[in-house]
Amino acid sequence: MTRLKMGIIGVGGIAQGRHIPSFLDLKDKVELAAVQDVNEERAEEVAEAHQVPYVFKDYKDMFSKVDAVTICTPNKFHAEISIAALEAGVHVLCEKPMAITTEECEAMMKAAEKNDRLLSIAYHYRYTPEAQLAKKAILNNEIGDPLVTRVQAMRRRKVPGWGVFTNKDLQGGGSLIDFGCHLLDLALWLLDDPKPIEVMGRTYDRLSKTPGQVNDWGAFDHETFNVDDHVTSYITFENGESLQFECSWAANIKEDHTSLSISGVDGGLSVYPFELYQAKYGALLDSTAKIREGEPAPGLAQAENFIDSCLGNDELVVKPEQALKVTKLMEAIYQSSETGTSVKL
């Protein structure tokens, strides 16, 4: 069986914690052929630990040695590196978000289409067992037409104190572009990609700019903090549906929680944990699910879908035009907050 030759660009936490372990578990389908990082010592260490044959200083030198790359750099470089890889005839799995601006996303899509290469974005929440179950329930008309979706991606005092997460120039934003984007993508996917028409949003940073913070995820400089730590939004769609959205790195709440619920005409559901709410047989019915042991981890399922798609044996679950829509919504939320008015799309 032909194995896909994979290169990793950026070997920091997400590469070592999710992507590399997933590819190693799928070694019958993929070979880790090359790595690159601006921290050359770290790249050498990762290559030695996993017997990766090639280590490059310049990511462009990697393209002749691989069939595909996984991009795990700060958000600012997603578009630049993706386009270079696609132009070189290399498939791309890019970490979320797709890019900081819609213009960058569109340029990535054009490069993929022009060079007949695959481009996918690592929105791995779609691969969680609960999300897969929710998708099947919706497709089987268990809730009828969706009406209102509610999303909360909330953390208590957990601003990432490592990496460049609080650097707006490199990341483009904070809690929304890092954490909230996952739940925005998941909601749109479950709703079958409705067309958004208006966005009202507010972003906050006062908590993290206040001195003397208690933070569970390391230290950060409140004086240089320049991204959002809490975001709210209300999104309406062309088909009449609406989405209530909130995310935070640092809310003063009792505990962390991630929730996504959809109320439809014939029923409703919650994703985490999966529950189904219906009115049947003259009664209100609540159904729960027991996730079977041995279900593949989301990172593994994501990697396998990308590899199989590159090898011509599957279809991408996360398509670039869907990831573009997430970036467009985030852009609109930031714009709405800056102007104090809703944004028509």
Image (cartoon, grey):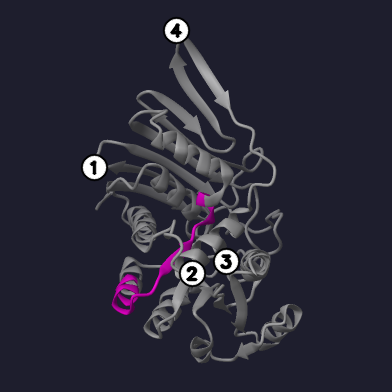
Task: Name the residue rendered at 62%, 58% in the picture.
Answer: 159
Q: Say few, some or many: other residues with alpha carbon within 10 Å of mark 4 (under 14 / 14 to 19 / 20 or more).
A: few
> Three-letter amino acid code at disc 3?
Phe
Mark 2, mark 1: which one is toward the viewer? 2
268 over 295 or under it: above or below: above
Q: Residue at x 72, y 78 (%)?
A: 50
Q: Secondary structure at mark 3?
A: loop
In this rendering, which labeled residue sits more in front, label 2 or label 3? 2
Disc with the residue nearer the chain's start (2 vs 4): 2
Above or below for 173 versus 257? below
Q: Which residues are magenta?
A: 109-126
Categorize mark 2 by other alpha carbons within 10 Å: few (<14), some (14-19), many (20+).
many
> Which of the 4 image quarters holds residue 332?
bottom left
Whether 121 is among the magenta residues is: yes
- Assess disc 3: are there few (<14), some (14-19) or many (≥20) residues with their C-alpha within 10 Å of its C-alpha: many
How far apart marks 2 and 4 lie (CA) works out to 49 Å
Tag 2 residue? 93
Q: Position of residue 178 (x, y in %)?
A: 52, 59
Q: CA distance from mark 2 to mark 1?
A: 30 Å
Q: Quadrant of residue 212?
A: bottom right
Would you name the residue on which mark 4 appears? 282
Labels 4 and 3: the sequence-earlier one: 3
